[in-house]
Image (cartoon, rainbow, N blue to C red):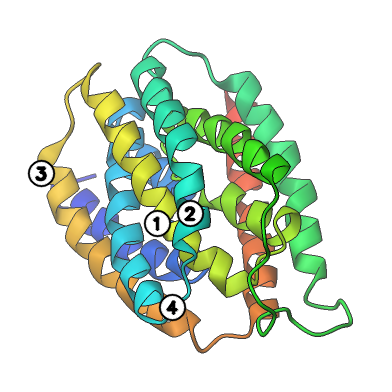
Amino acid sequence: MDINNVLLLAVFFSFLLAFVFSMFGQGGGSVYSPLLILLSYSVLISTSTSLVLNLITSVSAGYVFYRNKMIDMKASFMFVPGIVVGAFAGGALSKFVNSSVLLWLFVFFLLILGAKMGYTYWEKGKDNEDEPLPKLSTGMYVLIIVFSFAVGIISGLLGVGGGILIVPFMTYVLKYPTKSAAGSSHLIISFSALAGIIGHATSHRLDYPLIAITGIAVLIGGNLGARFSLRVKPKMIKAGLGLIMWALAGQILIKLLAFM
């Protein structure tokens, strides 16, 4: 395929993915990497570029959530130390690590959690958006640090921001309202993505032209998606996230089976 056509496709799908994923508190890295790989970019270029696009999307969308007071700053910054250390380590080691086993575990996790998130659309009961933010115990803070480090490793290795794990964790474990979890996730993702980028930069060269042209697309798409999400019901956000998890699991599974 002609290089110009490849770039046009990369720009179009980057905008579309940023719009959709920013609605669910994610940077879109879960799909940016597979997209770029399908467009014939190398794995390392795809994962590092994906992290940059994650950062841009999260900052753009996070600003919208911040203005609408849907980010718990204190809880968000509890994730930062662990996720930064983990993401930097994952990014630096990505050139040397075979992630096949991790991807298989990721597939099973996404299938199970996607089913749970999707089920909430038919679940009876009111959404928890009007409830106050939960008070976290010392034990929960310790759990956050451990969890965030693990998410950071995964983020750096696979080129994902981690929102696909953070939002369900905040919603089901920490008992946060869905939209507050989505908003806080953007702030957390921005730190993990930045740390992962630095980790990748220590081991290989980034594709700056690709980053620049797709970065503009996700900047616009992420901002528009975040604005649209404020008009969507929380249950629809959870159900949509569940479907995205299944789609991602299917993509990863196809990739793994192709190399068996």
- Dot 3 surroundings within 10 Å: few (below 14), some, or many (20 or more)? few
Name the residue beneath numbered marker 2: 76
Classify the position of the N terminus by image quarter. Answer: top left
The residue mark sitting in front, 4 or 1, is 4
Name the residue beneath numbered marker 1: 187
Mark 3–mark 4 distance (CA, rounded to whole Å): 35 Å
Query: Can residue 31 be seen?
Result: yes
N-terminal of the pair, mark 4 or mark 1, is 4
Q: Quadrant of residue 249?
A: top right
- Tag 1's secondary structure? helix
N-terminal of the pair, mark 2 or mark 1, is 2
- Percent coordinates x, y for residue 224 in the rendering: 33, 78
Name the residue beneath numbered marker 4: 69
N-terminal of the pair, mark 3 or mark 4, is 4
- Percent coordinates x, y for residue 239 in the rendering: 70, 70
Q: Amino acid at mark 2?
A: Ser
Most extreme residue toward the left, as rendered? 209
- Asked if the residue under mark 1 is in contact with the one under mark 4, i.e. CB atoms within 8 Å, the reply is no
Q: Residue at x 48, y 71 (%)?
A: 23
Residue 103, above or below 125: above
The residue mark sitting in front, 3 or 1, is 1
Tell which of 135 and 20 is nearer to you.
135
- Tag 3's secondary structure? helix
Mark 3–mark 1 distance (CA, rounded to whole Å): 26 Å
Classify the position of the C terminus by image quarter. Answer: top right
Query: Can residue 155 be seen?
Result: no
- Asked if the residue under mark 1 is in contact with the one under mark 2, i.e. CB atoms within 8 Å, the reply is yes
- Dot 4 surroundings within 10 Å: few (below 14), some, or many (20 or more)? few
- Asked if the residue under mark 1 is in contact with the one under mark 3, i.e. CB atoms within 8 Å, the reply is no
- Asked if the residue under mark 2 is in contact with the one under mark 3, i.e. CB atoms within 8 Å, the reply is no
Name the residue beneath numbered marker 3: 209
Mark 2–mark 1 distance (CA, rounded to whole Å): 7 Å
